[in-house]
Image (cartoon, rainbow, N blue to C red):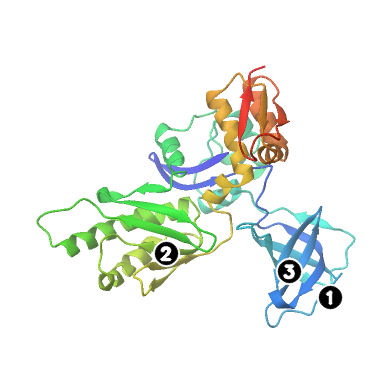
Amino acid sequence: MRIAVTKNDTLLDFALWRPAAPDMVGNVYHARIEALTSGMGGAFVALGADQSGFLPLQNGAPQLTEGQAVTVEVSRAAQGGKGVRLRLLAPDVASDKKGLITPGPTPLARLAALWPTATVVVDTPAAAAHIPPSLRARRAQGFTPYPEAIAAACDALEDPVVPLPGGMEATITPTPALIAIDMDAPPAQTGRPKQTAQFAANRDALPTLMSQIRLRNLSGAILIDPAGLATRKRQALLAPVNEALKPDPLHPRCLGVTGLGLIEIVRARIYPSLPELLNSPHGRALRVLRHILAHAPHTHRICGGSGIIRALEQDPEAVADCGRQLGRPLSLHTDLALPDFTWTVQDK
């Protein structure tokens, strides 16, 4: 489900909500220390149900032993090939309870808290069924389709190329270590010195770019290469960068300009970024279902490589929902002759 915060057909905030694959942030567990790893500065913790996480232990942390019962909270979702990160709430827990004690907030609850005066509008009964009792008083009556402008803005978040004011654009390239953003130069302008025009174009594009960073939840180390501006002139962009970052609830920090002239930003890595969600095995599996609903409504069976079928099997709720919208159940078939993430559909 897409959750969009809107005003006057403008997209202000955005999140993907996958009820069958929660990010776990904010979950509280009665857990057990599985292994202490002094070389990594922490411990692996068994959360129950074949789930585990990493608990950093800084100087001054209480002494823990393997097998010890603890209460922990998930402080960062699994991302970048690493599992969830934990925060210690209480050591030496004397309780027979194990596993999840309190679930964390859903993406809907988080956005509702950030925008406390916003009305909750849904487009389908299936979406309405997921609204918790605490938010039902804020729900508008009936069902309202996504406005076309908002749907287009949400679709555009999947494109790594971002149009910016003044004819500029930015290309976003996630890597395992950082997010690289290249701003391309605007069309040549006459009547103004080149560096003056380039500075103004970069400055005016920054609020839109910072908004896109938030909408896509790009996080960790972010390096931005401004367009066509001499390195010595880029320091002057730090003030508008800091101003454009102020509305972000994760309070990102601009660390300055590197020796190569790149603007360096760090943004808290708490939830998976939109590119990671879309390109994960689960994300690619859900893309199959969206394609079927939009372009192959007569599908009865999905044949795919082991990777795509395994990812679909891990989200039976999404497969069943797709079947309900099609009016028939969908069957899944693994074809070992196909590469992991390729697939075909069959009408009969």
**Mark 2 falls on what kind of element?**
strand
Identify which residue, 21 or 301, lies in the foreground.
301
If the image is split into quadrants, where does the C terminus sit?
top right
The disc label shown at residue 223, or none: 2
Q: CA distance from mark 1 to mark 2?
A: 40 Å
Residue labelled with disc 1: 65
**Mark 3 falls on what kind of element?**
strand
Q: Is residue 15 left or right of residue 162?
A: right
- Given this view, does label 1 or label 2 mark the residue nearer the observer? 2
The amino acid type of the residue labelled 3 equals Leu
The amino acid type of the residue labelled 1 equals Thr
Label 3 vs 2, first from the N-terminus: 3
Q: Position of residue 338 (x, y in %)?
A: 65, 35
**Mark 1 falls on what kind of element?**
loop
Q: Position of residue 65 (x, y in %)?
A: 84, 75
**Few, some or many C-alpha atoms within 10 Å of disc 2 (few <14, some 14-19, many ≥20)?**
many
